[in-house]
Amino acid sequence: MKYFVVSLVICSLVMSYSEAQELPMRLKKIVEECKARLGAGDDDVAAMFKYEPATNKQVKCLHACTMRLLGILDKNNKPFEAGAMAYIKSVTASNAELEKLLTEVYNECKYFPASKEGCEFSEAFRVCIIERSRAKGIHMLLH
């Protein structure tokens, strides 16, 4: 039984590490798909990774599309808790403290601001995530 538990722990660590290694490639594919869907340009994609508020609707909707395809947002651009938690697990690679902090950030931002719709809400949600993450000393994780 002891060896079985050790094997499960090792497999879990390997899977988490593997998921973390695959995330940049997965993200690039998703961003390219969203870019094509929206007719966005390379400048829009570059702006997306500056971790600053979007300057136009095209970039806001590019963020929304990316977060939808990552499973962080639902089809209405609202936070999807199960998808967000899965994403957090994939980017933390078994770092329990980072997972805890990112979950706190998610919970602080998931209803903020409730009055906005569509790409505007997803952008406000994204900005909240960035600001709360920085306040907790978390360096941004891809997106």
Image (spheres, rainbow, N blue to C red):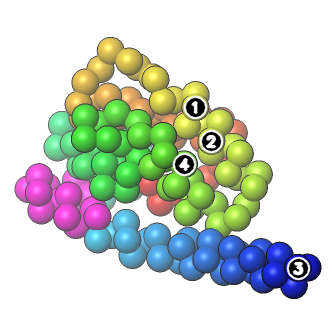
Residue under pointer 1: 107
Residue 60 is left or right of residue 13, and the answer is: left
Task: Report which quarter residue 32 is drawn in.
Answer: bottom left
The location of residue 46, given as percent across then percent down, is 30, 59
Between marks 1 and 4, how big is the CA–CA gap?
Answer: 10 Å
Q: Amino acid at mark 2?
A: Thr
Determine crowd level at label 2: few under 14, some 14-19, many 20+ residues with C-alpha closer than 10 A.
some
Give the magenta part as a residue range: 30-45
The location of residue 114, given as percent across then percent down, is 38, 18
Residues at discs 2 and 1 in contact (Cβ within 8 Å): yes
Residue 2 is left or right of residue 57, and the answer is: right
Residue under pointer 2: 103
Residue located at (69% from left, 43% from top): 101
Mark 1 residue element: helix
- Residue 134 part of the magenta-drawn span: no
Q: Tell us which disc is closer to us: 1 or 4.
A: 4
Q: Amino acid at mark 1?
A: Asn
Residues at discs 1 and 3 in contact (Cβ within 8 Å): no
Q: Amino acid at mark 3?
A: Met
Residues at discs 2 and 4 in contact (Cβ within 8 Å): yes
Residue located at (52% from left, 55% from top): 86
Mark 3 residue element: loop
